[in-house]
Image (cartoon, helix red, strand yellow):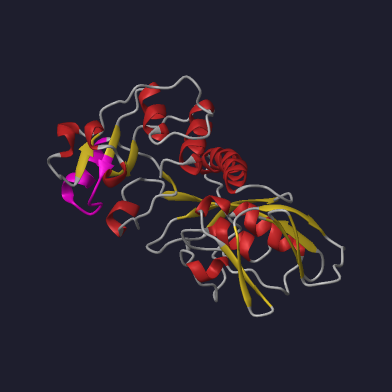
Amino acid sequence: MFGVLSRLPLAVLLQAGVDVVGVVVPANRVPPFLLEGNGRFPTPITPVQPPQPTTNLFQQDSSISTLELAAQHQIPAFGVRHLQAEATLNSLRALSPDVICVSCFPQKLPPVLLQLPRLGCLNLHPSLLPHFRGPAPLFWTFQRGVSETGVTIHWMDEAFDTGDIALQKPLTLPDGISNQEAEQLLAKVGGDLMVDALQRLANNNLPRKPQPAGFAADPLPRDADFELNLNWSARRAFNFMRGTGGWKRPYVITINNQLIKLQVAIDFQPHQILSHPIATNGNQVIIQLNPGVLFAV
């Protein structure tokens, strides 16, 4: 919630001159000392006290950067516990929002909240929906060896990531991009796309295209989802390890009935062929994949 996929789109909206009337975050992700009353009173919605602001809107990492950004612009911020509570709805109604913009918010918006803004609710999702619905779209993008991805702005409904598509922007992930770099790229593109969506919405010409049936949401990854496959190409394995390294899980692969654990991908050669399935060079492991060779530790 306080990562770049939340903060950077907010920064882009503010730089575009969008009138942001409030910022809402999950209360359990706000340091208690920033909540009114030091978080001792678990009300459905609690005002957040402004933290010390930063001077760089586009810094990549800060545990409270979204709140700092709101404080810089004198935007009221709230930590929410119960979205359907009357106190929550009354606080949000008092802001008189024309539209609610969402990015990486971990709770479903109930119908009464979806109907609160006069122009509806829009969500920024870092994939080309209906592909890679769910809470970890970038993980599954890398795990399935997909380099052509993008960002979707969609109208929100009562489920996660299933509402009508408004706008999409495709992009290509380069070999070796890290999760942090990919999030930064998608967040900037997504922020620009949200600005475009709001401008179209104001002019009453924002599209609504229903998503096709037959697509399910992907879950959060389990340990087993970090397993490498000998039938993968070296490029796919390399990009998967580089793009999901932030999860801090070991990558396992079985070669000749031996389980090998890897931590970091170093390089790959797309066409190289080894004389044996596996070799070592110091602490580096060199693995024959199909096609190509992966270098990792």
- Is residue 81 within the magenta segment? yes
What segment is highlighted magenta in the picture? 79-94
Quadrant of the image occupied by residue 284? bottom right
Find residue 102 and report its horizontal and vertical position in percent.
43, 47
Q: Please name the residue shown 33% across and 42% down the image.
A: 25
Whether residue 265 is situated above or below residue 8 in the rendered picture: below
Quadrant of the image occupied by residue 208? bottom right
Residue 254: in sight, yes or no?
A: yes
Find residue 75 and report its horizontal and vertical position in percent.
34, 27
Whether residue 71 is situated above or below residue 295 in the rendered picture: above
Find residue 290 and report its horizontal and vertical position in percent.
79, 71
In this rendering, position of residue 264 left or right of residue 76: right
Quadrant of the image occupied by residue 45? top left
Whether residue 43 is situated above or below residue 280 in the rendered picture: above
Find residue 66 and report its horizontal and vertical position in percent.
41, 34
Whether residue 35 is situated above or below residue 230 in the rendered picture: above
Q: Please name the residue shown 34% across and 53% down the image.
A: 114
The single residue placed furthest to the bottom in the displayed view is 257
In this rendering, position of residue 237 left or right of residue 40: right
- Is residue 185 within the magenta segment? no
Q: Please name the residue shown 54% across and 74% down the image.
A: 213
Can you say which quadrant of the picture contains the N terminus? top left
Q: Please name the residue shown 33% across and 55% down the image.
A: 109
